[in-house]
Amino acid sequence: MKMARVILFTGQMDAMSRFYGEVLGLAKIASDEKGWQEFDAGGARIALHSGPSSPGRKGPKIVFRAKDVAAQRATLVARGASLGKVRQGEKFCMCDGKDPDGNPIQLSDC
């Protein structure tokens, strides 16, 4: 099996669509279904579904691979993303943030 998509429920379709499309720069996949938008996240899709948002205390984290985490962070912050500091671990570099609904996201070089 392969992962097909992550579905995030949202009451802020416009803000979430702008974040995943314009801020993160993911390509929107055409859909004529009301209350549904999908974005190509390279090997899987992120789908936005109209409905109440309910990110939990330890909900899913969507991780995006970046060759240069610091450079990618700077680009995304300039577009309006809310991202924390770049951290260098023993094996990889990462940076955590949140989308407009509070779902955790991460940039990682592995």
Image: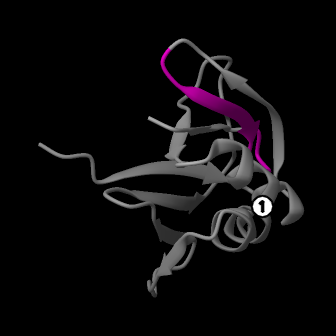
Q: Nearer the viewer, residue 25 or 28?
A: 25
Q: Is residue 99 visible?
A: no
- Quadrant in which the C terminus appears: top left
Number of marks drawn = 1
Residue displayed at 73% across by 63% down: 19
Circle 1 SS class:
helix
Q: Is residue 28 left or right of residue 55?
A: left
Left-right relation of 41 to 101: left
Q: Is residue 46 visible?
A: yes
Indicate the position of residue 8 as horizontal and vertical percent values: 56, 49
Residue at (52% x, 46% y) in the render: 64
Q: Position of residue 45 (x, y in %)?
A: 40, 60
Residue situated furthest top in the rendering:
90
Q: Residue furthest left?
A: 1
Colour logic? one colour
Reply above or below: 5 against 102.
Answer: below
The residue pinned by badge 1 equals 75
Residue count near mark 1 (Cα–Cα under 10 Å), binned few <14, some 14–19, many ≥20: some
Amino acid identity at mark 1: Thr
Residue 85 in percent (x, y) is at 82, 30
Is 60 covered by the magenta stretch?
Answer: no
Q: Residue at x 46, y 87 (%)?
A: 32
The picture quadrant where one finds residue 90 is top right
Quarter the N terminus occupies: top left
Write the start and end of the magenta stretch as one range.
Answer: 91-102
Q: Nearer the viewer, residue 57 or 73?
A: 73
| Vertical position of residue 52 compared to residue 31: above or below | above
Which of these two is toward me, 20 or 51? 20
Q: Judge left or right: residue 70 versus residue 8.
A: right
